[in-house]
Amino acid sequence: MDGQSLNIKQTDTARLRELFPGLFSEDKIDPEKFKAAFGDDIDAAPPNERYTLNWAGKADAYRVLQERTATTLRPQPELSVNFDTAENVFIEGENLEVLKILQKSYYNKIKCIIIDPPYNTGNDSFIYPDRFKENLEEYERRVGERDEGGYLMKEGLFRKNSKENGHYHSNWLSMMLPRLFLARNLMRDDGVIFVHIDDNEVHNLRMVMNEVFGEENFRNCIAVKRGTKSVQAQFDSIDKLGIAYEYILLYSKKSDIRLNHFYFDLEETKEGTWNNHWRGTDRPTMRYELFGITPENGQWRWSKKRSLLAISNYERMLKELQSVDPTQDDIDKWYFSQEEDIDLLRLSRNGKPEHYIAPTNQKFGNNLWTDLQLNGTSELKRLDLDTFENPKNPILITRMIKWMTNGNDIVLDFFAGSATAAQAVLELNQEDNGTRKFILVQLPELCKESGKAYKSGYKTIADISRERIRRVIRNLNNSTDNIDLGFKSYKLSPSNFKVWRSEDITEENIERQLEAFIDPVKPESQVEDMLVELILKSGYKLTEKVENRGDFYYINNELVVALTKMNQEIAAKIMELSPKPQKVIVLDRLFEGSDELKTNTALQMKDAGVELRTV
């Protein structure tokens, strides 16, 4: 195990080779073969005449993306709630590093990503990805190990991206590009991403997301109503119209997935009335009994004659597919091949036309959300946590999660702020008895000493995030026993193992570098911390089932990790596990220099079809 995060360049190259092996020559992409294979699809215009988004530092941003990391996540049970059983995750740390760490474990596993990055108003401070080389001491200081008090320092790390800066837009784009790329890797094939933004960068964000996700995967630009500004604020900006809306860009990972129908819930929006076209009192011909569904339960989208035609089409489809129980993919493929109205046939697996019903308390949604405001300050006041400026409205986040998720889906927010997404997931699970999980990532950015949060005892924004989750959990504890009321807290930290850095070898440090081969475990490393790091770097999630079997840990009935002891009896005990593990990881020092024990253990496991790795 090399202890590094996923090699992005190597992984993408391997995928390309799998699809197009003929493009490679001597293990590298051959430009001439590429041109020959794709011919007319290659833009022959000079580089400065192509339609593309470019900026100062873009190439460096891609280099930052491809750089691997040896960092890990350190568990913080003392800051968690129900750490041993919880499947929700909160991570304190710089999100680019965290996203790299999560690549192996959560690749293609996230259903919905919702982020609220800096809007680049000229007053935002964020990390610029402009340190492409740094020594170990600088690196450890950056992730907090040697920082006084354990927090990220503001100086040299966060910088205000002033509009007077000549690279004002470039800095923001360089910050966003690698994070969006890594986020896409984590998304499932049917996954989606929502990104909040305002007028300052919405145009550039659309372009960079087209580059990362593909223009064909753009789904919507949703306009959301902002809170009303004070009279003084409006007067101060008299040189231009007031800003009434902000935006949410919605992209899918693939263009061939079908998104759920979206409805506005009138009880949620409190609009009271809706489009007369769908009101049962105005369209009585749409209210009839079919499949045992009475008019009191809702209203059909079409006349009874047209609905019966759809049922007939459904029965004909079953015969053509020659299958009693076709999958939804089969239904979609069959139906999209017909010339009839493609919106007619949306029957559920049990034959009931659920998608035809338009309940009387709902209306079909669009991309203009005037019923909700962005700001969620009142919600923090309800939690007695009025310490965060401009938090997002949890009802807004709930709407997006409810629209795009169900079942055991994972929701990711790597600009977590005050942890609004965590509240939305927990409360929505309570509402519909769901089992959604969240992963939140937030920088331990220091709160302003003059601010209300600092005076209330919160040193960092991450402290506020965790406390909000705890308070939401306490509120829900009084009302339900059916949802996961807990979260595991982790902190971005240097690796528990010494990392071999060939580029840093000098006469002065050669002895220290060689020690990494003799015993790679750092003296201060704890067993629990090493276990989490090895689980992550073996490609397992932070919430996998971990059994402590005394002499070793058994993870997800697949992986064994031995960190304290190893002998012939323990090796035999591992081989007796049922089901038998696929891989065993052992600290090399546990063999205590006995080549015989190490060789016998390796041969025994190889004969049993078990992979042995030593660290």
Image (tube, grey):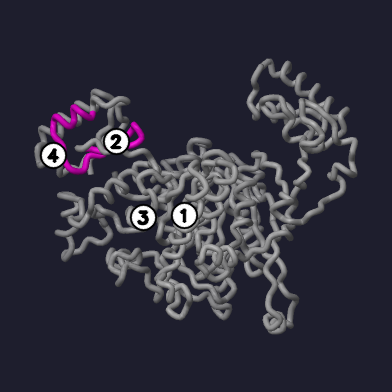
Kind of residue at badge 2: Tyr
User: Badge 2: few (under 14), some or many (20 or more) residues near its Cα, within 10 Å?
Assistant: many
Q: Quadrant of residue 510?
A: bottom left
For the residues carrying marks 3 and 2, which lies nearer the camera in this image?
2
Where's residue 68, x and y in %? 38, 54
Task: Find residue 554 and name its label.
Answer: 2
Q: Which residue is mark 1?
A: 474
Relative horizontal placement of residue 207, taking residue 152 as reference (left or right): right
Q: Are marks 1 and 3 in contact (CB under 8 Å)?
A: no
Q: CA distance from mark 1 to mark 3?
A: 37 Å
Task: Find residue 591 and name its label.
Answer: 4
N-terminal-most mark, 2 or 4 = 2
Residue at x 55%, y 38% (from the top left corner)? 407
N-terminal-most mark, 3 or 2 = 3
Task: Find residue 69 and name its label.
Answer: 3
Quarter holding the N terminus?
top left
Relative horizontal placement of residue 171, taking residue 229 as reference (left or right): left
